[in-house]
Amino acid sequence: MRRTAALTHVLVGRWHARTPPGRGRVELGDFGRRLPSLDRDEISVYDVLVRRFLRPRRAAFAGRGLVLGLDAEPEWMDAFPADADVKVRQATGGFGRELAASENVDWLVLDRCLQRLPEMPLALDEVVGRLRPGAALVTLFTGIARAEPGERRPLWSVAPYAARRLHDERRELERVEVEQFGNVTLALAWLYRLPADRLTDPELAAVDPAYPVLVAVTASKRGRRG
């Protein structure tokens, strides 16, 4: 508890509002807000962490790919190679129609869309069933829930061990690996929608298992590419 309080004090100083808030209004930077903000992140901690996850794996995104997620234009798309042949589809509802494009791709990225659905195992079964043999699958989750507008509100927060079990139980998948990113500083920045450009590289790199802001799973469908 003392550690969290100390880090909160540091963050308060770093993101403190430069000008006094107007009457009846509380700036995010002073940590005095009583109601959640639903504003769009200026520079999202989540997007920065996704870039840190994807960039070392750029070579894996050769061929045709599909990104299916909450955003029509994810901010982290620049993590892919400049010549990547990738399409982006915004997930709506059960995303059945959007998945039609996944049948002929070499890799698929699911960006937080599974955790908006009531039956994640059934949804992942549908995804895996449509993938061609040998296709790579990347599934991204947030392990810490925050207030979101209705159309973006998650039903689940996904812990790393739960993400692994979800994919391990799909027998058509192999080479399942799970990686997590986050710590108490990043969790506070994520919850308060504080801009990630004020975080240092050591803060972004430090991982505390208790604060999984980003949970990323990589796997592939059994079989050889045709």
Image (spheres, grey):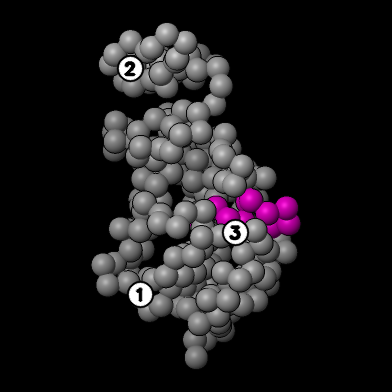
Q: Amino acid at mark 3?
A: Thr
Q: Is residue 82 above or below residue 147?
A: below
Is residue 200 inside the magenta stretch?
no
Q: Nearer the viewer, residue 66 or 219?
A: 66
Q: Position of residue 61 (x, y in %)?
A: 38, 70
Q: Secondary structure at mark 2?
A: loop
The quarter in which the N terminus is drawn is: top right
Q: Which residues are magenta?
A: 111-120
Residue beneath the point at 44% across and 15% down: 26
- Residue 17 disc label: 2
Q: Amino acid at mark 1?
A: Asp
Nearer the observer: mark 1 or 3; the answer is 3
How crowded pointer 3 is (Cα within 10 Å; few <14, some 14-19, many 20+) is rated as some
Nearer the observer: mark 3 or 2; the answer is 3
Q: Nearer the viewer, residue 36 or 3?
A: 36
Residue 161, can we see it?
Answer: no
- Residue 85 disc label: 1
Does label 1 or label 3 sit earlier along the sequence?
1
Q: Which residue is mark 3?
A: 92
Residue 147, can we see it?
Answer: yes
Residue beneath the point at 49% across and 46% down: 214
